[in-house]
């Protein structure tokens, strides 16, 4: 899981550092940097996947009140320490990789410095050395083999960071093909779920049971043929009283015919089950949107339990009192930008005096204590 994130000279992030846990609740006023932190993870992921430095980290992303022209990002995942320095030539409006490196247990695995890449084997002995495009991550050159399993693992683990802000209004029931990752708004949930059924069929039974426990009358979530290649995502509900259903004991709906809350619940339980099977880092921006209070708590308890077992890692942004009261005192981080300057983050703690009020009320009043 991600254990540390460091950001310097990117928008409002200057010498910013977050030490993370398996479960992390991000709190703070609008504009304090919570969603921007998620954005940085997305940009870093796209860069390592092959996007150019000029596109991922533009000149406009430099911190406006600083004169430095180098952005620094560091990401620690377990025993891996990744570091990236992007140098910007402001007058020419060009950007390139000044330095990129990956260390495992204190020993270098990969180094990209001034256009030259040096790779190392799993036993840390030198491997290939060659020149490369200054505008891209050298990790895009890594092809799996028996001597670079650590480098390959890190590349794959970067792909397991999912940054999501669900929008049920954009979700379609019809899938033309499978996709390996959901869109940020989960509009392609049907196509992603289609891939899950192919790649991890064993998860199906566990997920269906979770949904039956969470949604009254839920029976199954399945894909049905809709032409030669297309599939439609459908949900069946089971009635306890057959007379309530005109055409039998079950009623089928296309996924986008469900209420926004039902769609959100199905997606959240799917994400939770999938992440715990695949060592995912989920970054969820206000996941409680569209849910009623009785629906939030069971998902919250299951999420907290799985994260405590370190089966997955979850960062989420929330303003919901139920989530804040349950998690903020032990898993909360307070983001702030004093007078619109640099983002700062502090672990939240609750003093004995504070316990006279729910922590959500303290957040509402701005009476937060932090280390």
Image (cartoon, rainbow, N blue to C red):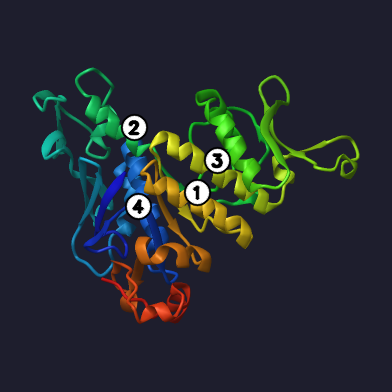
Could you tell which of marks 1 and 3 lies nearer the N-terminus? Answer: 3
Residue 228 location in percent, x, y?
70, 19
Q: Which mark is residue 302?
A: 1
Single out the mark in the foreground, 2 or 3. Answer: 3
Q: CA–CA distance between discs 2 and 3?
A: 21 Å
Dot 2, how many residues are within 10 Å of its Cα: few (below 14), some (14-19), or many (20+)? few
Q: Nearer the viewer, mark 2 or mark 4?
A: 2
Q: Earlier in the sequence, mark 4 or mark 3?
A: 4
Q: Position of residue 162 (x, y in %)?
A: 43, 44
**Horizontal side, residue 236 vs residue 353: left or right:** right
Q: Secondary structure at mark 2?
A: helix
Q: CA distance from mark 2 to mark 4?
A: 18 Å
Q: Are marks 1 and 4 in contact (CB under 8 Å)?
A: no
Q: Which residue shows up at 51% across the image and 42% down it? A: 271
Q: Which residue is mark 2?
A: 156
Q: Are marks 2 and 3 in contact (CB under 8 Å)?
A: no
Secondary structure of the residue carrying numbered label 4: helix
Question: Would you name the residue on which mark 4 appears?
Answer: 40
* Residue tagged 3: 270
Left or right relative to 364: residue 47:
left
Query: Which sits earlier in the primary sequence, circle 2 or circle 4?
Result: 4
Residue 2 vs residue 273, the one in the foreground: 273
* Quarter occupied by residue 338: bottom left
- Going from N to C along the chain, the mark reached first, 1 or 4, is 4
Q: CA distance from mark 1 to mark 2?
A: 26 Å
Judge whether 340 appears above or below 50 on screen: below
Residue 283 visible? The answer is: no
Seen in the picture, residue 227 relative to 246 is either above or below; the reply is above
């Amino acid at each position: 899981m991600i254990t540390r994130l460091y950001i310097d000279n990117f928008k409002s992030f200057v010498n910013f550092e977050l030490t993370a846990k398996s479960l992390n609740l991000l709190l703070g006023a609008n504009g304090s940097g919570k969603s921007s932190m998620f954005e940085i993870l997305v940009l870093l992921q796209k860069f390592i996947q092959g996007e150019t430095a000029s596109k991922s980290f533009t000149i406009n992303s430099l911190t406006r009140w600083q004169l430095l022209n180098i952005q620094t990002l560091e990401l620690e995942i377990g025993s891996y320490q990744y570091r990236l320095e992007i140098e910007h030539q402001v007058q020419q409006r060009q950007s390139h990789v000044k330095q990129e490196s990956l260390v495992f247990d204190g020993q270098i695995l990969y180094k990209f410095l001034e256009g030259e890449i040096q790779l190392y084997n799993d036993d840390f002995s030198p491997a290939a050395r060659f020149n490369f495009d200054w505008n891209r991550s050298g990790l895009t050159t890594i092809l799996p083999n028996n001597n670079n399993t650590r480098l390959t693992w890190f590349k794959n683990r970067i792909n397991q960071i999912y940054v999501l802000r669900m929008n049920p209004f954009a979700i379609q029931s019809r899938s033309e093909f499978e996709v390996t990752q959901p869109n940020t708004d989960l509009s392609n949930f049907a196509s992603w779920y289609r891939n899950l059924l192919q790649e991890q069929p064993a998860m199906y039974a566990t997920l269906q049971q979770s949904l039956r426990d969470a949604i009254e009358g839920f029976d199954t979530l399945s894909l049905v043929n809709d032409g030669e290649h297309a599939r439609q995502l459908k949900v069946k509900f089971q009635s306890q009283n057959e007379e309530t259903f005109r055409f039998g004991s079950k009623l089928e709906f296309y996924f986008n015919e469900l209420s926004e809350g039902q769609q959100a619940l199905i997606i959240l339980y799917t994400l939770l089950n999938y992440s715990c099977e695949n060592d995912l880092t989920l970054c969820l921006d206000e996941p409680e949107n569209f849910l009623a209070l009785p629906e939030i708590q069971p998902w919250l308890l299951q999420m907290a339990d799985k994260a405590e077992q370190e089966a997955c890692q979850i960062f989420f942004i929330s303003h919901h009192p139920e989530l804040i009261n349950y998690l903020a005192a032990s898993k909360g981080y307070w983001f702030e930008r004093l007078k619109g300057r640099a983002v700062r983050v502090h672990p939240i703690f609750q003093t004995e005096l504070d316990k006279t009020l729910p922590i959500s009320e303290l957040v509402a009043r701005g009476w937060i204590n932090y280390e």
